[in-house]
Amino acid sequence: MNVLICKTAEEATEQAYDIFKRRFGNGLKTLGLATGSTPLKLYEKIRTSGWDVSHVTTVNLDEYIGLSPDSPQSYNYYMQEELFKYMNFKNTYLPNGMAEDPQEECERYEQILKENPVDLQILGIGPNGHIGFNEPGTSFHSLTHVAELTPSTREANKRFFEKDEEVPTKAITMGISSIMAAKEIIMLAFGEGKADAVRKMVEGPVSVDCPASVLQKHEHAWVILDEGAAEKLKR
Ligand SMILES: N[C@@H]1[C@@H](O)[C@H](O)[C@@H](COP(=O)(O)O)O[C@@H]1O
């Protein structure tokens, strides 16, 4: 794990974009994508780049169960709006949150990941240390699975919904083992609200109590932070 501390979220995004550009230039085939507010600026840079991405496949980390792709809170919708409608990717994959059999959907998605090994995975972190929707306590050996969202994650994500009770209670997420299979990972975290989770991820024991701490074991993981997110790190 390499940690990079930048003054602002803009500078951190610029660093991430630089890595992305280099990998893109070196024949990146499969890009792993995250949602949430953190990568928004990065996606803006990518979508305005004017690149031909017709040889690039994308795979997303997760999707809420019960939200269809045309629901504005779904991650399918987010990806359409932020990236896909502007770019000519070869294939774009997200879990189907409306699948009749979510278990079967997890198996189908894991197969997609096998066929499209991720070259570069973009990640964010939840305030409780989750990655994707792998909540504290999730096994490091987990593959794509149905996750129960913790009250704290539902609380953190309710800002995207009109009413609290609209926040889904379950999601399909790539597992921790599926995420760690990526050749390279860029983890972005911005703002003081992430400082505790960042400290546990970077300095804490590698433990299921903080799923993101598993990144300490990834040889090519870049943790790119702004000052706020880095404020509790020993320096
Ligand atoms: N499942 C997503 C994560 O993939 C994301 O990293 C996290 C942080 O979101 P934000 O960037 O909005 O803080 O939120 C959600 O829970």
Image (cartoon, rainbow, N blue to C red):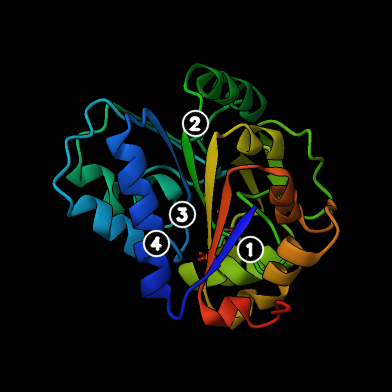
Point 82% across, 64% down: residue: 204
Which of pointers 2 and 1 lies earlier in the amino acid sequence?
2
Name the residue at the front extreme.
235
Residue 221: percent from the left, percent from the top?
59, 48
- Name the N-terminal-most of marks 1 and 4: 4
* SS at badge 1: loop
Task: Note whether ligand 1 is within 8 Å of mark 3.
Answer: yes
Numbered label attached to residue 118 = 2
Residue 135 seen in render: no
Q: Mark 3: which amino acid?
A: Thr
Q: Is mark 2 within 8 Å of ligand 1?
A: no
Residue 15, located in which quarter of the rendered image?
Answer: bottom left
Few, some or many residues within 10 Å of mark 3 (<14, 14–19, 20+): many
Mark 4, residues whose alpha carbon is within 10 Å: few (<14), some, or many (≥20)? some
Image point 38% across, 72% down: which residue?
A: 11
Task: Report the Cα–Cα distance between label 2 and label 1.
Answer: 21 Å
The kind of residue tagged 2 is: Val
User: N-terminal of the two: label 4 or label 3?
Assistant: 4
Residue 166 location in percent, x, y? 55, 62
Q: Earlier in the sequence, mark 4 or mark 2?
A: 4
* Mark number displayed over residue 97: none
In contact (CB < 8 Å): disc 3 and disc 1 = no
| Residue 35 - label | 3
- Name the residue rendered at 54%, 45% in the picture: 185
Return the residue found at the far left. 50
Between the C-alphas of marks 1 and 4, the distance is 21 Å
- Kind of residue indicated by mark 1: Gly
